[in-house]
Image (cartoon, rainbow, N blue to C red):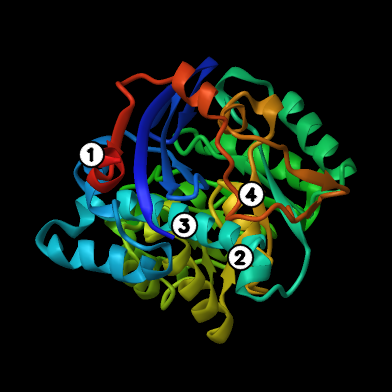
Amino acid sequence: MRIVAAHVAECALPLPRPVTLGPTTITKREFIALRLVAEDGTVGDAITYPRNGPIYEALQRMAPALLDTCVTDRRATIDGYLARHVNNRAAYMKAASLADIALWDLAAKQAGLPLHRMLGAARHEIPVMIVAGYRLEQRTVEDLCAEVERRCEEGYERIKIMLSGTDRRLDERVIAQAYAIAGDRLCADAHWAFDGIADAAFGLRGIDGIGLRFIEDPFGPHRAGLYGDFSRMLRTPLASGEDLPDPQALMELSRHIDILRIDATTCGGVSAANALMAMADLSGKTVLPHVFLPVHAQLAGAHRAVAAVELIPDEAEACPMFDLLEGRPDIRNGMLTIDETPGAGFRLRWPEVVRHASKPILTFESERTAAH
C-alpha cells in the first residue's frame, strides 16, 4: 500500500483558564496533526503537542519524502530520512515520530487489527493514572483534596498531582493532606521546577519518604544527567523521560531511574516506543507513558512493563485533545478497556482539525496520483 497524500495541520484550542506547569504557563493547547492517505483511500493519523517547537516546519520538509513509499517499508522510510539528516536529527525527531505512528496506523488498518493485537496482545485492559491538581495556585488545598478523594472513589490506583515547585511549604501541606486520603496511590509532578541537585533536595525534602508512588520531572530534559546522583539521595522513586529527544537518551536515563515516561509522539513513534517498552520489560523497569492515551493504550496492550496509561480528565480543562479525535476512552473503576478498532489508536476528526487550524493546512500529493 503506497502513500499518495499527506496533510499537516497545527491547531490551537484555547483553555478557559491558564495552566501553570513549573516555569511554563499555558493559555492554549496546541497540537500538530498528521494524516497520511494510502492509494486505497485509507488514512493514517497521528497527533502530538508541538510545545513551541518547529514541528509544523519539520513536517513541511519531511512530508514530501513520505509520498510513494510503501506502508510495509516504514522503518526504511523513517530511518532513511533521519539518516539523511543525521546532523540535524533532533529537529526532525518529533516529525518522524508522527510519521511512524501514522504509518503503523495504516499498517494495522490494512491488517484489520488494533495495534495491540498486531503486536501480539498481552492483555485487553490497563489501569489508568489520572492527573489532578491543576491550577494549584488558584485553588484551596481543601478543594484539591476533594478532587483526590473523588478520584479514589472512582477506582484510580495512581493519582498524580502537581507541585508548585516554588512554594515548598504549600507543596508539603498539599502532599500531606492528599496522602492522608489517597495513601500510596498518590504521585507528584514537579514539572522541571529545579535547576540543580541541591535546589531539588531542599525543595523536595519535606515530601520524600512520605510514601509517594513517584516524583516526576524535578529537572528539565537538558538536566537528565543529574538523575543518577539525585536518585541515590531519595527514598521516593523518580519518573522522567517524556521530553527526551530520542530512544538513545531514554536508554541512558533508564540506567538511573526505574520509571520511564515514554512518549511515542516524541521519541520516534510506535517503532521506538515498542522497542523501549520491550527493553524496560527485560531490565525490570516500569513504563508510564505520557498522555496521548489512544496510542499508548495500544502499546500497553502488548507490553506488561506498562503499569498504567495517563489521562488528563475533561473536567481539568487542561488538554482538549479528544475534541480533535473520534471516540472516548472506555474507563470503568479506574481500568481502561483497550479499543478494538483497527489502527494505532488516533482517529482524527479532520473537520475539527481544520476548524481549529492556526496555520494553513499543508497538503502534499504524489505526482503519480496527480497525473491521473
Q: Amino acid at mark 1?
A: Gln
Q: Earlier in the sequence, mark 3 or mark 1?
A: 1
**Residue topped by disc 3:** 264
Distance (Cα) linking label 2 and label 4: 27 Å
* Cα gap from disc 3 to disc 1, whole angstroms: 20 Å
> Closer to the camera: disc 2 or disc 4?
2
Residue 171: image tag = none
**Upstream in sequence: badge 2 or badge 3:** 2
Which residue is at 75% across, 39% downward? Answer: 177
Numbered mark located on residue 310 in the image: 4
* Residue at x 76% of width, y 26% of height: 142
Q: Secondary structure at mark 1?
A: helix
Let me know if residue 36 appears in the view: yes
- Give the CA separation, mark 1 to mark 2: 29 Å
* Relative image position of residue 326 (x, y in whole percent): 65, 35
The residue closer to the viewer here, 22 or 338, is 338
Q: Nearer the viewer, residue 134 or 299?
A: 299
Q: Position of residue 69 (x, y in %)?
A: 31, 60
Q: CA distance from mark 4 to mark 3?
A: 13 Å
**Looking at the picture, how far across and down is residue 82, in whole percent?**
22, 63
Query: Most extreme residue toward the bottom, as rendered?
Result: 282
Residue 129 in the figure: left or right of residue 290? right
Residue 243 is at least partly visible in this image:
no
Which residue is label 2 attached to? 111
- Which residue is the site of mark 1? 60
Q: Of the residues under marks 1 and 2, which one precedes in the sequence?
A: 1
